[in-house]
Image (spheres, rainbow, N blue to C red):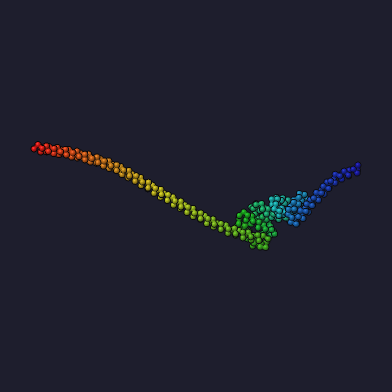
Amino acid sequence: MKKILPCAVLAFFLPLFYSYAGEQSLASSAFVQGADAFRAGDWISSLFLLRKAVAYPENFNAETYYMLITAEMYSGEYKNAFHDCEIYLKNFFDSAYVSYVIYHKGRALYYLGEYDKSVIVMSDFCHQYPEHEMYASALFWIAESFYAAGSYEEAELLYSRILYDFPDDAKAAAAQYRIESIAQSAREEKLLYLLKQTGEEYLAAKEEYERQLLLASSESTAQTRNRLLDLKQYNSDLEKKVADLEKENAELSEELGKIKTAEANESLELLEKLKAKARETQKLLDVRSTAEGVK
């Protein structure tokens, strides 16, 4: 009985021991492999392994989480990086890596298109860590947020500050490039404005020309219409005159007919008179001849 009890206890706890030892081994292996990939710059592999490693309680620490966040940023997984930055700042607020995590959080917000929030986070970083080695880089990302949002004047001021205050910083060359880009954009914008103005002036001139043509066309049409109206009135007057002349001609023809009729009647009367006179003369001649014959 005494031998059976230790054996039973051992049989119960031994699997638990091996299970715990196995988990310890897996957690350790995931961390070691993830750390090796991190040091080698193999961000995809380190991301996968470190994410697996922090799932184990023994790896839930500031160092492992910081490497995970860094791997996420280099892998372009900005949403996960931002989420893990929030977890980090909540659980490891007294860590030596807090300032770098705040910096990563600001960059993650920039890449997520949250420019206003990125400016706030990076500005807080600059206020809290004015002597930090990433100070110039934080200024640069604030400027980048302004640039991406179209606030070129604010962006240019920060780029210029980086050039003058941190000429040897790694971000100085990028700041110089941005300043030149802003100047080029300003020149292009001015050129486009001038082209637009010229185009608008051309369109205005074209519209005025077309308006004048339309006006001229309208005036010509009006003149033509007036001319047609005048011709129509003239034709109407002519028709009236012709009608009057035709009426007058008819009256004259009627009068002439009357005259001719009268003349004809007069001629007939004269002819009858002449005939009567001739008959009388003939009678006289006959009488005379008879008288002479009697003698």
- Is residue 143 something one can see in this rendering? yes
Locate the C terminus and report the quarter of the image it occupies. top left
- Is residue 82 something one can see in this rendering? no
Name the image quarter holding residue 146.
bottom right
Residue that extends furthest to the left in the rendered view of this protein: 295
Compared across the picture, whether 106 is left or right of 208 comes to right
Q: Residue at x 41, y 48 (%)?
A: 225
Report how many numbered discs are placed on residues in the image: 0
> Image height check: is 291 above or below 67?
above
Report the front residue among 90 and 13. Answer: 13
Q: Residue at x 39, y 49 (%)?
A: 227
x and y percent of residue 285 in the render? 13, 39
Report the front residue among 268 and 151. Answer: 268
x and y percent of residue 294 in the render? 9, 36
Q: Residue at x 74, y 56 (%)?
A: 41
x and y percent of residue 79 in the render? 69, 50
Q: Residue at x 76, y 53 (%)?
A: 34
Compared across the picture, whether 19 is left or right of 94 comes to right
x and y percent of residue 289 in the render? 12, 38
Report the front residue among 82 and 234. Answer: 234
Compared across the picture, whether 287 is left or right of 257 comes to left
Compared across the picture, whether 21 is left or right of 123 comes to right
Locate the N terminus and report the quarter of the image it occupies. top right
